Image (tube, rainbow, N blue to C red):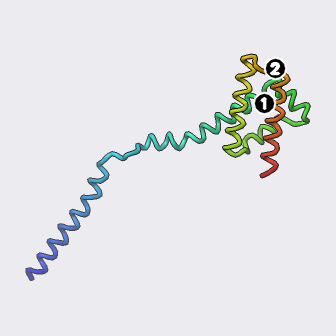
Amino acid sequence: MRFRVKMCVALLTTALLVGLVPARAQDKQHVVSLGDLNKDARRPAETRQANEEAVRTLLSSETAQKALKSSNLEYQKVDKAVGQLNDEDLAKLAERSRQAQRDFAAGRISDRDLLWIIVIALAIIVLAIALR
């Protein structure tokens, strides 16, 4: 009988100790906070949105509209194609768009050069979509 009582006490003690360990482990602060995880999760979407905006800003310029007309392309179709680019292609195109806008604003390139850049960008967009 004593053996059974000792076994019950030992099992109850073990159960209580095991039950307290996870509770104490949760009291510690995590290495990465939930806010940091949320920021990291939002970052790719924000980057993509900024890249799309850079390309769309270039494509909505007066020079780009002329290039679209000369290429017989509709802005809506090109705009839709921009949204279908993968992240890598979009990032490259956005960087080129930003650089072209900076160069044009600084007077380093002419309207004609900007037009060529836009035509090349349009070709990249069309090819990237067509090759999918």
Q: Quadrant of residue 121?
A: top right
Does 5 appear above or below 70? Answer: below
Q: Residues within 10 Å of mark 1 (few under 14, many from 20)?
A: many
Contact check, label 1 and label 2, Cβ < 8 Å = no
Q: Amino acid at mark 2?
A: Ser
Residue that carries the numbered disc 2 in the rendered image: 110
Q: Which residue is mark 1?
A: 59
Amino acid residing under circle 1: Leu
Residue that protrudes farthest toward the top in the picture: 107
Quadrant of residue 92 within the rendered picture: top right
Q: CA distance from mark 1 to mark 2?
A: 16 Å
Compared with residue 129, is residue 99 higher up or lower down, i.e. above or below? above
- Which residue is the extreme one toward the bottom? 1
Q: Residue at x 81, y 45 (%)?
A: 127
Q: Residue at x 28, y 55 (%)?
A: 23
55 with respect to 49 (left or right): right
Q: SS class of the residue under badge 1?
A: helix
- For image coordinates 84% across by 27% down, the residue present is 115
Taking the image as shown, residue 10 lies to the left or right of residue 44, namely: left
Nearer the N terminus, badge 1 or badge 2? Answer: 1
In this view, the residue farthest toward the left is 2
